[in-house]
Image (cartoon, rainbow, N blue to C red):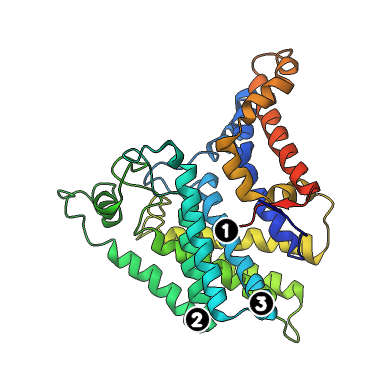
Amino acid sequence: MEKQKQSQRLQSLDALRGFDMFFIMGGGALFVALATWIPTPFFQSIADQMSHAKWGAGFTFEDIIFPLFLFIAGISFPFSLEKQRERGMSEAAIYKKIIRRGITLVVLGFVYNGLLNLNFETQRYASVLARIGLGWMFGALIFVNTRTITRVWIVAAILIGYWLLLFIPAPDGNGAELFTREGNLACYIDRLLLPGRLHGGNYDPEGLLSTLPAVGTALLGMFTGEFVKLRKEGLSEKKKVVYMLVAGCCLLIVGLLWGLFFPINKYLWTSSFVCTVGGISALLFATFYYIVDVKECRGWTLFFTVIGTNSITIYLAQVFINFTFTANAIFGGFIGLFPETVQPLLGAMAYIAVCWGFLYFLYRQRIFLKV
């Protein structure tokens, strides 16, 4: 972690990243607690979206959070690449920086999963951070070395190729259906090659083969960033928003239609999932971009920006810092004055307040964790 001057960047990107991370920082628990306090069908339907869909049951809002973060990481890359080249960085130095960032995220994923406990037999080596690191790294290397049209063909090849690969049954599947945990190739490769503990027992949702389509998710974000960065006569910022909304709707439709043949499955990161969530991510970014950067309506964004500028920090900090203890120490007595039915909601709010206060302190001090 280092003290640094915050560089000029898309403010909508920080706000959207913060919105995304809010749900990892206790936002999901907040809505679940709200449904417990007010058990109406409306609030319960929202609470149901705050947990991952079961295998084969489509997707929920919770399933969007992770790929949205990878999509956002993709958006920011064309801007950072342009700055690196403007500073005169050589291509070799750019490659080195890309690879170093990818490997750093993989290692941080190990640490997040308990590497420092030194229990290597039960260590989980696949992780959310590793998928972000590898998906972004390979996407960035492709972006640096190819033209836009080539990248489009590469994404198509990745998604179609992955679809075809998953028609190969798992050798140890004993006739199980292709898209089950036991029967599909991606889970088989995890069982065969991943050391340590698999998150799902006989598969890992951040496994090896399913990282391939995650590269497609990163590249979809990079396409978006490249488009936003484009300066062309007749292409106003409002037109960019319209084009992004149209592209997002098209991707969403493609994903939903593809899902009729290739199930939308976050655990396998299926190609239909990539398109569906990519479409939703594009729609969300277009909305934030229009409100924050085009219309410059920014008064409401501070809450999310504070989270978004230190997103990796809060993700890791929740493992190493007992925010629950701090929240109880500060607010526990006050919360105890209220009826038991509302206490979970107040507890969730207290947890978020403590986490946000920690991030706000870092934000005010201009301390940001850079990977």
Residue underneath mark 1: 280
The quadrant of the picture occupied by the C terminus is bottom right
Q: Which of marks 3 and 2 is nearer the N terminus?
A: 3
Report, in whole angstroms, how far the alpha carbon at label 1 lies from the one at label 3. 26 Å
Q: Nearer the viewer, residue 318 or 169?
A: 318
Q: At numbered mark 2, what does the secondary structure look like: helix, strand or loop?
A: helix
Give left or right: position of 50 versus 311. Answer: left
Which label lies toward us, 2 or 1? 2
Residue 45 visible in the picture:
no
Q: Is residue 359 visible?
A: yes
Secondary structure at numbered mark 3: helix
* CA separation in Å, label 2 and label 1: 27 Å
Q: Which amino acid does label 2 sit on?
A: Asn
Q: Horizontal placement of 139 versus 36: left or right?
A: left
Tell me what residue is drawn at x 65 percent, y 43 percent: 22
Q: In which quarter of the image is residue 12?
A: bottom right
Residue receiving disc 2: 145
Q: Are marks 2 and 1 in contact (CB under 8 Å)?
A: no
Disc 1 element: helix
Q: Which mark is residue 82?
A: 3
Q: Which of 319 and 268 is in front in this view?
A: 319
**10 Å crowding of disc 1: few (<14), some (14-19), many (20+):** some
Residue type at numbered disc 3: Glu
Q: Is residue 24 above or below residue 136?
A: above
Q: Nearer the viewer, residue 272 or 136?
A: 136
C-alpha span from label 3 to label 2: 14 Å
Q: Are marks 1 and 3 in contact (CB under 8 Å)?
A: no
Rendering coords of residue 241 (x, y %) = 70, 69
Instruction: Tell me where residue 3 appears, x and y as whole percent.
Output: 74, 53
Up/down of 65 relative to 135, above or below: above
